[in-house]
């Protein structure tokens, strides 16, 4: 179920919950309400006891909490370590709409990776450390171009075989790091799910979601 469908389902549940809380008989002590919420209250339901109001507030808070949970980023991975939500597209063939922009950058990644990268860069900045983003998701054609320009890693170059790069799954990010930023990353990046995964490429960091 995608995020929009989940929210729509929760709205339906909220409406059903509210309807169940409306009094069926006129209460002996009531408070007249002049406010109406379209789609939530039925016509003429303008009174509620203090108890009803408390129950309504609790139910609404619970329902809204559930709706928020439904929009939580999906971090499911396949057995091959590929984001399950992106696996059907293929490496380097992921549409922009299925990715997310890294906050403060124009580069894109798998949504959980982009969110984690944004938090990491923001926390580094709060500590007085500047981290720049030079590359995120790399489509297949770009992988071919990089391989032609920089050579294949297995042959002493700096590029993965096109169609196998972690950039092609939105899991890798290349960063602009001075010595201070590099040291900060090596000390703190793991807490955000990022590892310095490729020898000879200290700028290249790969993301994996927490397993627990």
Image (tube, rainbow, N blue to C red):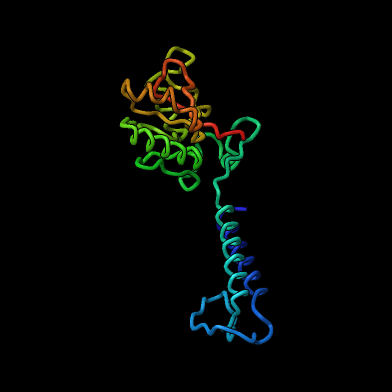
Residue 129: percent from left, percent from top: 32, 30
Q: Nearer the viewer, residue 136 or 103?
A: 103
Q: Nearer the viewer, residue 122 or 169?
A: 122
- Which residue is most to the top? 156
Q: Nearer the viewer, residue 189 or 108?
A: 189
Judged left or right of residue 99, residue 125 is left
Q: Is residue 12 above or below residue 79?
A: below
The quadrant of the image that shows the C terminus is top right
Residue 58: percent from left, percent from top: 60, 65
* Res 77 quadrant in image: top right
Q: Residue at x 50, y 46 (%)?
A: 98
Judged left or right of residue 123, residue 42 is right
Q: Residue at x 49, y 83 (%)?
A: 34
Residue 109: percent from left, percent from top: 46, 38
Q: Residue at x 34, y 31 (%)?
A: 131
Q: Is residue 143 above or below residue 3?
A: above
- Give the number of callouts: 0
Residue 144: percent from left, percent from top: 44, 27
């Amino acid at each position: 179920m995608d995020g929009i469908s989940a929210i729509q389902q929760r709205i339906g549940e909220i409406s059903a919950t509210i309807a169940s809380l409306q009094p069926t008989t006129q209460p002996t002590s009531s408070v007249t309400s002049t406010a109406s919420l379209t789609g939530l209250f039925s016509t003429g339901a303008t009174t509620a006891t203090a108890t009803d109001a408390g129950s309504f507030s609790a139910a609404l808070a619970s329902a809204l909490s559930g709706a928020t949970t439904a929009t939580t980023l999906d971090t499911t991975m396949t057995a091959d370590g590929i984001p399950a939500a992106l696996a059907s597209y293929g490496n380097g063939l992921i549409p922009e709409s299925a990715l997310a922009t890294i906050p403060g950058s124009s580069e894109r990644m798998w949504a959980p990776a982009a969110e984690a990268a944004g938090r990491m860069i923001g926390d580094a900045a709060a500590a007085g450390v500047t981290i720049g983003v030079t590359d995120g998701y790399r489509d297949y054609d770009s992988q071919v171009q990089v391989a032609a320009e920089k050579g294949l890693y297995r042959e002493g170059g700096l590029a993965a075989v096109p169609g196998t790069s972690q950039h092609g799954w939105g899991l890798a990010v290349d960063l602009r790091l001075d010595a201070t930023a590099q040291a900060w990353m090596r000390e703190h990046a793991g807490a955000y799910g990022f590892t310095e995964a490729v020898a000879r490429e200290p700028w290249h960091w790969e993301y994996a979601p927490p397993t627990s």
